[in-house]
DNA sequence: CAATGTTTCCATCATTTGATGGATCATTAA
DNA sequence: TTAATGATCCATCAAATGATGGAAACATTG
């Protein structure tokens, strides 16, 4: 029994899938309240009743978007985990920052939707928090700050949250922050990565910061 | 010629001022789109036409809220500047974190409104960005990372932004993050402050982090 | 008090928005 | 071919929403 989401992904040219894609972009750009079903239908080029036929009410469509989103993020975490395995802590952090920045920068609606989920009291009951809790724990383990999901200290969680949120902030807020920084679009991502590494790596490693790749003496 | 805002603040019991207060809270909680003029009027206990009489259209009221907000923030920055003067860099950062966390935690709608302003494409043209650019530069100077507003490097700005956003994130996202951390309401603010100091001070000072108050040799 | 200005509310509009029923067209199975 | 199922659109609804006109209440001042 394939879920509606799997069904939609199987055929990306179907209207059902195109609705999901457009909804993702528009919800990310204008939020749940700021996006109307007519906006989505118009973006796809269909009638709104087709949208309702495929996804039910607006909140259901939004929920589908969020679930779809989280699966994409989990994929990225697996990539980070694979690349980070066996490297030094400083390297692992650098890899995490690079991979997440690149991924989110390519699909900016992701970070927008996540941030809106964190900060707006929405009546919809998409259980985003459980997912995020899992993500946080996963990063903590991948960074070697904890050994299993059940034993992550609040301190470690809070530190990961800061890192995670900082990435989201910079990606989502690009149109707002970039003019303030006064750099062009290509330089922005580099400044962001550099800043995050500069600020966060020394604290985690308790030492000198970036300092190149995988020093021979693998200080833990 | 007193501005409408000054006029409203002069008499906090007037309906005009009470509308502004309620609007501030509700816009902060539900965003611009998610807040209706009827919600605000109902919160104050008046008819919506009274609201329109005092503040004009909805976007004008929102603009007044944002302006009001920014003046409050500027006041806090002056407090930080005064307290930080003459202290070590680590102390100045610690003071900034403490003061801003306490202030924002007392009026959480402030950080919500700021974050919504950063991340949602709103059609309203409240020039929030210029204000924020000024705030960023002010902190940079107060922290001793720059000497005048015109000569703040993108790197310094980006680092301040990370700090500033991290505070906003934790305060605005408390209802979301606190359950994940598994701490109670009173402990949350302490964990946040501790985390921010732990992560950010070492990077700025290039050294050992918090390490107590104002070391005798005032290393720059 | 009378006149003038300010504030408040009631009634009402025009749009927008979420949502649905039913007709139509396409596709597939028997 | 025919019946059934799936997909799409048109027309329409009811509720919510931003906004306004005008009458009434209230306050201020000469």
Image: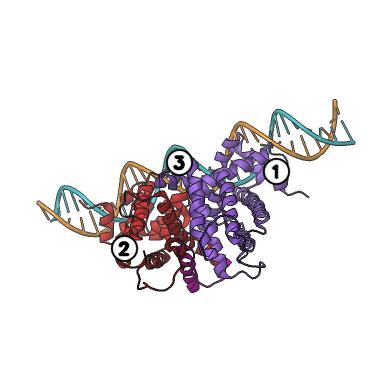
Chain colours: A red, B purple, C orange, D cyan
User: What is the quadrant of residue C10 in the picture?
Assistant: top right
The residue at 54%/64% (across/down) is B204
The residue at 64%/39% (across/down) is B18
Determine which residue is flagged by label 2: A81
A118, above or below A22, in the image:
above
Determine which residue is flagged by label 1: B9
Give the secondary structure at mark 1.
Answer: helix
Residue B167 at x, y = what percent?
53, 53
Residue B190 at x, y = what percent?
50, 47
Q: Nearer the viewer, residue A11 or B102?
A: B102
Q: Are marks 1 and 2 in contact (CB under 8 Å)?
A: no
Real-space Cα distance between discs 3 and 2? 31 Å
CA neighbours of label 1 inside 10 A, class few (<14), some (14 to 19), many (20+) = some
Give the secondary structure at mark 3.
Answer: loop
Q: Give the range drawn in magenta.
A: A179-200
First in sequence, mark 1 or 3: give its number.
1
Determine which residue is flagged by label 3: B184
């Amino acid at each position: 029994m394939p879920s509606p989401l799997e069904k939609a992904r199987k055929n990306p040219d179907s209207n059902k899938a195109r609705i999901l894609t457009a909804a993702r972009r528009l919800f990310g750009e204008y939020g749940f309240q700021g996006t109307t079903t007519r906006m989505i239908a118009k973006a796809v080029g269909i009638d709104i009743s087709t949208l309702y036929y495929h996804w039910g009410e607006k909140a259901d469509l939004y929920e589908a978007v969020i679930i779809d989103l989280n699966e994409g993020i989990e994929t990225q975490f697996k990539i980070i985990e694979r690349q980070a395995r066996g490297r030094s802590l400083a390297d692992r952090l650098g890899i995490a920052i690079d991979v997440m920045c690149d991924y989110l920068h390519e699909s900016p609606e992701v970070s927008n939707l996540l941030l809106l989920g964190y900060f707006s009291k929405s009546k919809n009951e998409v259980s985003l928090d459980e997912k995020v809790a899992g993500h946080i724990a996963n990063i903590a383990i991948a960074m070697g700050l904890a050994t299993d999901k059940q034993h992550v200290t609040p301190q470690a969680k809070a530190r990961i949250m800061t890192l995670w949120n900082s990435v989201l902030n910079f990606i989502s807020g690009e149109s707002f922050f970039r003019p303030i920084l006064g750099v062009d679009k290509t330089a922005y991502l580099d400044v962001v990565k550099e800043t995050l590494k500069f600020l966060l790596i020394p604290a985690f490693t308790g030492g000198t910061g970036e300092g190149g790749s995988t020093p021979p003496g693998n200080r833990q």
